[in-house]
Amino acid sequence: NIKVNFMLELLFKDLQQIKAIRKEAIEFSGMKFRGQGLKFIDGKPIWIQNGKPYYIFLLMKLSGRFMQHPAILNEISNIIARIVDFSKVDKILTLETMGIHISTALSLRTKKPLAIAGKIKYYDEVTSWEPPHQIEVTKKTGYGVSKLYINDIFPEDKVMIFDSIISTGGSFSSLIKKLKEKQIKIVDAVAV
């Protein structure tokens, strides 16, 4: 297929120019490692520099804060629409900020509403009002602990969770655990 070959060529070009950000791997902090460069520790890709372990965060065009190409967004949403049975999905849930661009394309393609797990808690400081069904998720990743807030997802909703990348798996794990506690059905979880 000419279209698929073109997409693969674009992605291959991008992959040849990938930059990375390295963040200290807190789960291994205080430990010293031999050698330099890429190592797999407990099945995770870790960068070793001067004996210290770092997570590798690849800055790809999929990460959301770089130029987004319509052809790539379209192709990714096409592929996800083919591998997920959206007849069983009520809503798409993505994480702020890196999943928003692709999940928006996916929402448009599948006609499924999009909810975003955001970093800000909605709360009115004057009246103390907050959305009654706001779900707070404590997200624990290799980069640290933070909070996410979800609105418009309710018990018995059937959701597909989406993010552009998985680094440590902490975001997905935290979301899945909290959604299950709230009796929200997880149909699928996808990352590019």
Image: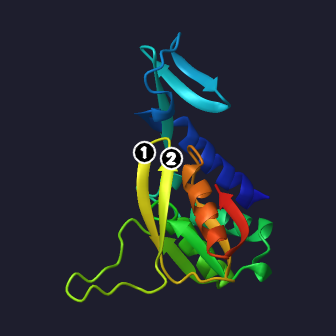
Name the quadrant containing residue 147: bottom left
Q: Amino acid at mark 2?
A: Thr
Q: Closest to the observer: 119 or 110?
A: 119
Residue 64 image position (x, y, % from top left): 46, 58
Q: Amino acid at mark 1?
A: Gly
Residue 184 position (above or below residue 77): below
Question: Position of 160 compared to 83: left or right?
Answer: left
- Measure how far apart labels 2 and 1 are at the Cα level: 5 Å
Mark 1 — residue? Answer: 144
Helix, strand or loop for disc 2: strand
**Label 2 with label 1: CB-CB less than 8 Å:** yes
Which of the labelled discs sits on residue 141, or is there none?
A: 2
Q: Closest to the observer: 80 or 156?
A: 156
Name the quadrant containing residue 29: top left
Residue 42 image position (x, y, % from top left): 66, 29
Helix, strand or loop for disc 1: strand
